[in-house]
Amino acid sequence: MKYQQVIGLCLIGIWGSIFYLTNAKAEETVFDYKRNTFYGMGHHMAIKNNVPISEGDEFVAFTYNNIPMKTKVIEVIDARPIIKKFKKRGFEKIYNNEKLWNKIGFYWGFRGPNEPPTFAKLALPEDFDLTHAVRHLPENVIVLPGKGERLSEKELKIGYKKVKKWLPVKIPDSQLVLSGVWYKNDTGKQIGEINVGKAEYDQVDKDKMIKVHVYKFFLNKGTIVGMSDFARATDKPEHADTAPPELTEDTWASRDLTSGFVSLDKEKTWQRLSIDTGFEGISYLITTIGKDNHQDYFQYHYTPH
């Protein structure tokens, strides 16, 4: 049996649902992620469909490499003057002008056939790489970071015992690989992720994984609240614009990145925020950990290279 550990990047499972907030009028009870979520890169978020956003508007910012944080809009930016500058001067001249690039270079990642006409810059730490910005979350919302802590070998063994009976197949010890992550906030709320893999190895290089079927479980308070499964192989591309994955002890259980978790109903249900990245395209998702696989938010952004 091989025990392998992955830091909080082993993610999958696309789930979603609708949540009803307490103490609200009937017509205002549904929290709509589609209306209140904006995708982003770096410190900027995209604004589409003439959604009114102003300086000072408050958001919760999510990322895969840092903890979620409350923040505000510090600048609303019209894309048209920026587009004109890029067309007039060209990428190279703007890129080589450090001052100008620092001001408008963010646009280069947002450009494309469906690029946003307006952007909002958020007050964020320098190393914060924004993926989702969500507004109007209720005061009693529970938020967990997408950056997790890997499970110890002891925790993996305990977690495997909890989920083993729910596996649809038997996995020989020679093919079993495990990884896991705790997603915790500073109040003690947490989601556990257990990844169970049935691996196949190269016949010559016995340590080289070439295929794996992943069974991913999410646990809350010791109870399984969601499960998904998927297969990966070193000869099968996962995106049209990228090479097939290299399956290592750090990557076999992951094909997307978690940006955080949200519960609007006191941990009865959880939404997972994630991104799935290719070479030119990024999918931004919010789904609910559960059996229905309902998707609350989806945005695909394509940037040609």
Image: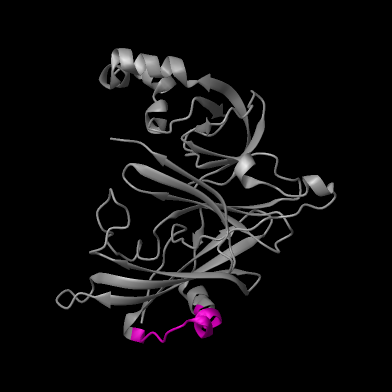
Observer able to see residue 185: yes
Farthest left residue in view: 204
* Residue 295 placement: quadrant: bottom right
Looking at this view, is 128 or 17 the one in front? 17
Residue 270 image offset from top left, x and y in percent: 63, 59
In the picture shown, does residue 227 fall above or below 103?
Answer: below
Q: Residue placed at 29% from the left, 21% from the top? A: 91
Q: Residue placed at 41% from the left, 26% from the top? A: 107
Residue 139 image offset from top left, x and y in percent: 76, 45
31 horizontally vs 229: left or right: right
* Residue 184 placement: quadrant: bottom right
Q: Residue placed at 56% from the left, 66% from the top? A: 192
Looking at this view, is 28 or 54 the one in front? 28
Q: Quadrant of the C terminus?
A: top left
Residue 291 image offset from top left, x and y in percent: 58, 69
203 horizontally vs 15: left or right: left
Looking at this view, is 223 or 238 the one in front? 238
Observer able to see residue 97: no
Colouring mode (rainbow / by chain / secondary structure / one colour): one colour
User: Which residues lie in the magenta part?
Assistant: 160-173
Residue 194 image offset from top left, x and y in percent: 50, 70
In the picture shown, does residue 29 fall above or below 193?
Answer: above
The answer to if 165 sits in the magenta stretch is yes
The answer to if 64 sits in the magenta stretch is no
192 horizontally vs 172: left or right: right
Q: Residue placed at 32% from the left, 53% from the top? A: 239
